[in-house]
Amino acid sequence: MKQRENRRTATWAGMVICLLLLTLCGCASQKETGDSTQTGNEQELSQIVTDTEATDDTVGEGESVETAAGESEDGSSEAVSSQSDSGARPQSEEAVTEDDAILYGDEQEDAYLPLLTGKRVALFSNQTGIVGDRTRGEEQAADTSEAVGEGADLQPFGKNADGSDVIYAEHILDLLLERGVDVTVVFSPEHGFRNEADAGASVSDQVDEKTGVKIRSLYGSSKELTDGDVSSFDVLVIDLQDIGLRYYTYYLTMYDLMDACARAGRQIVLLDRPNPNGFYVDGPILQEGFHSGIGRLPLPVVHGMTLGELAKMINGEGWLSAGKDAADLTVIPCQNYSHKDKPFIAVRPSPNIKDMRAVYLYASTCFFENTAISVGRGTEYPFTIYGSPYLKGAAGYDASFTPVSMPGATDPPFRDQECFGKSLRQLSLSEVQSAGIDLRYLTEAYRAMQETAPEVSFFGKPDQKGRYWLDLLSGSDLLRKMIEEGKSPDQIKASWQEELAEFREKRKPYLLYEE
């Protein structure tokens, strides 16, 4: 902090000297020309000074909060630092300074390591638990997380602009062990600790080859926590990257862990991360009777919260079996982050989310899962393309692809069959982001297939309770029925606006960051 103040003082001194020199030059120039307006150089310097004042004010507020203890007792965000509109992973063309960068929860060691001293610690994480979501050395500038401008979202996670592999910074597990923390077990979510398993695949327990720590899988046939699991630790640390959607299952594993900790009196320390889809809220609320492995809480499809905020809501709304505020929860919030930001992330969050465009489109194209339409699993572009053999000859469905077996998609839908559909990789990034959940893809494909293959069930097969996969994804059968009735995307989206407004009010007490 002192170094920041010294840099700030030096910057101000340099600016004052430059301003004096420019003023003298401007006066001389004005005497010759009779022009009383500001010179271009003076205007530019004046703007720099103005921008610096705004930055310094924001940094000063952010520095005042060093731990999660700044939260007020009622769970409000009054004592949380004011958040700037800039993030560490911006898409702005302006240069980003060190003081503008988002500071992740896991980077604030002074805030959470004292809570772990002398305790047996369990870690809930996966491959995304890279401290600060950062890369090392020369890789930093070329990493997708530092990419600027539209089109950068198409660059695959894990690859630099030149196609070389990204070298990531330290994992939270390694950091904790280096700091002498007694990590007794690591809990992993869907896809496993190393992000290699197919969607929905059962993952077995194992031992981490690098550290020798036991990895306990909480997805698949052995996902139920046992008394032995809970008795093996005193504090649960949570650090992994979510993408903010109700059917993205990491938060459900977090919920199960929180529930077990609340019942057993175990402390929870959550190291928060930005939500790349945290800039909007959209979609219908999950209704009773449609709970499943991809949704159990009354949330919209896009809830617009970080895992830290969602954990606070789970605890505060009494959604845990032990009741309201039953969990001993401490959230280490990010600094310099707000919900206005659209930060890039650096690590692939799951096997078939391969770039930032997929992160943004997932809320819209995931509705095709388990229908007669492929979302591109078994290709390099899942969730950013879609198509089907049944759409052959349909007007406007002239993009083609053939799914094949590959890691993370060993048996994709329509494997080795040519699919005809659309690519969304040419859309401007701003168009993708501003559309929110875009139902045009789903409704138009449904109508097109009524022409090309009316004998095929577009929505696939229902389960024993009569629920289609789309019903579980959307949270009720209303979306499917409105599509079948021929409702327009605008009419469908209008149907969930009232419940969304109620949800936004309900979540306000749990927000840690400025909207």
Image (spheres, rainbow, N blue to C red):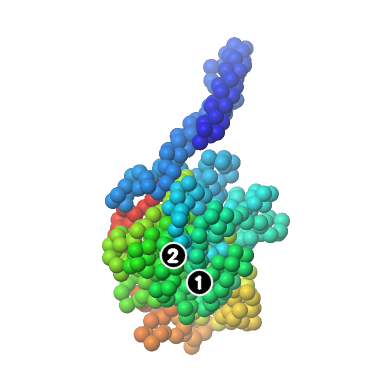
Q: Which residue is mark 1?
A: 216
Q: Position of residue 433 (x, y in %)?
A: 49, 57
Amino acid, disc 2: Phe
Q: Residue furthest top?
A: 31
Amino acid, disc 1: Arg
Tell which of 306 and 435 is nearer to you.
306
Establish if 41 lies above or below 148: above
Q: Which residue is mark 2?
A: 233
Q: Position of residue 105 (x, y in %)?
A: 48, 51
Establish if 66 lies above or below 431: above
Disc 1 from disc 2: Cα separation: 13 Å
Tell me if label 1 and label 2 are in contact, CB under 8 Å. Answer: no
Q: Position of residue 7 (x, y in %)?
A: 56, 31
Q: Quadrant of residue 481?
A: bottom left
Q: Residue at x 50, y 53 (%)?
A: 106
Q: Earlier in the sequence, mark 1 or mark 2?
A: 1
Mark in front: 1 vs 2 = 2
Q: Residue at x 61, y 79 (%)?
A: 410
Q: Residue at x 38, y 87 (%)?
A: 464
Q: Position of residue 228 (x, y in %)?
A: 43, 73
Packing grade of label 2 (10 A; few <14, some 14-19, many >=20) is: many
Q: Is residue 87 left or right of residue 228?
A: right
Disc number at residue 510?
none
Q: Residue at x 54, y 27 (%)?
A: 9
Q: Is residue 371 left or right of residue 496?
A: right
Regarding mark 2 in the picture, which secondary structure is present there? loop
Regarding mark 1 in the picture, which secondary structure is present there? strand
